[in-house]
Image: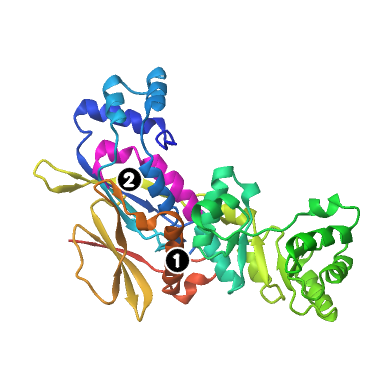
Amino acid sequence: MTSALLTDRYELTMIDAAIGSGQAERECVFEVFARSLPAGRRYGIVAGTGRLLELLRDFRFGDAELAWLRENRVVGAVALDWLANYRFTGSISGYREGEVYFPGSPMLVVQGGFAEAVVLETLVLSVLNYDSAVASAASRMVTAAQGRPLAEMGSRRASERAAVAAARAAFIAGFGATSNLEAGRNWGVPTMGTAAHAFTLLHDSEEAAFTAQVEALGAGTTLLVDTYDVRAAVELAVKVAGTGLGAVRIDSGDLPSQVAAVRAQLDSLGATGTKITVTNDLDEYAIAGLIASPVDSFGVGTSVVTGSGHPAAGLIYKLVAKRNDAGGWTSVAKKSIAKATVGGRKTPVRTLVDGIAAAETIYIGTTPEPSVDARSLLVPLVAGGTVDEAYLGPDGTALARSHRADAVAELPEDALRLSKGEPAIPTNYLTA
């Protein structure tokens, strides 16, 4: 299925007008960056790159799309002919998926003719804004969990396609599993899930429900114990599954006291190896508040798929340079109040001190000498219109997950605090 109409009308009307002015093929450089992080956040996580690259391969205007554009008089005949032959032939570089970013970080750089590059704006931003928002929130939850497993289970709190994207982004950020099967099929994210309260309510008794689940899934399953009375349910769970019961799940109540009581009860019944997982509208703050409790794992829904209050990362797509008549590059930038941009072709590096990130240094119009104390941040993603397949599919997703762990490990300790603060490291611009 084509991704070409996952865009805004003005992307195409700009192409129509640029063809008329003779500027459609003028070589340009666009950047994706955030002017700022969500209020109080100290870093962001790049996510969505692998999804975007797959959508780019399918960005084609077929007969049905062209017919609709013609019938609705979106663009003229010349522009329709141009769109009929559209193939992105330029280059794209960017921060690796899973990389940490800060205000001003040029996380994606698109170079090509104006028309072929500007038409990608909405697609690029719709993918990266959502996925990066989810991954950034999920990364904070992973930090708060202090090594305890997290599962993403927010599919019912997002649109059907956003749910898949959210599961992938959370996995990249360090979650261990998702409830979403399509994310498992498409992206290789491990899936999990057992039963909801409806399963218990279906049966004539809680014992009958537990028995049916154990017979179907084995004693290692997770039994939901808060449909009626938690204490009675825990006793029944151990009676039915034995002391080898895998886990119990608590989805309501005053979790710290509830968890402590359940742990004591399980131990008294001999189920010392049975784990406790909690859900119930958790976010990074609630997770941090439960760290002193004997919780073994967490399931997170609404907060992760909504970016924990910031469902979009605030990324923008701006023209920063264009070819001049002499063949060189001319920097361009907005000067509008509160929305000014920094023009010019940029080379970002992460400056390190003893292996810890100290600054984001962005060179404008120049390329720095390689240094053991600076890590180059841009990698090629698309060359001559050809996508680097290393970043696609389950393998690309696993690669992004691994890189996120390495990138976060470089951050100073202050970056991992949940309290509000400034970006963990400064962004410095250096001009040739």
Location of residue 373 (image quadrant): bottom left
In the image, taking residue 241 as reference, residue 152 lies left or right, namely left
Q: Quadrant of the C terminus?
A: bottom left
Of residues 402 and 41, the one drawn nearer to the viewer in this rendering: 402
Mark 2: few/some/many CA within 10 Å (<14, 14-19, 20+): many
Tell me the SS state at disc 2. Answer: strand
On the image, the x and y values in percent for residue 212 come to 82, 58
Q: Label 2, on which residue? A: 318
Q: Main secondary structure of the magenta part?
A: helix
Q: Residue at x 45, y 61 (%)?
A: 44
Q: Which one is in front in this view, the residue at disc 2 or the one at disc 1?
A: 1
**Residue underneath mark 1:** 404
Check disc 2 and give the amino acid type. Lys
Task: Relative to 53, say whether 232 is above or below.
Answer: below
Q: Which amino acid does the dot numbered 1 rest on?
A: Arg
Colouring mode (rainbow / by chain / secondary structure / one colour): rainbow
Q: Position of residue 147 (x, y in %)?
A: 58, 74
Q: Residues within 10 Å of mark 1 (few under 14, many from 20)?
A: many
- Region of the chain picked out in magenta, as a range: 111-133
* Mark toward the start of the polypeptide (2 vs 1): 2
The verdict on residue 329 being magenta is no
Please indicate, yes or no, whether residue 246 appears anywhere in the rendered image: yes
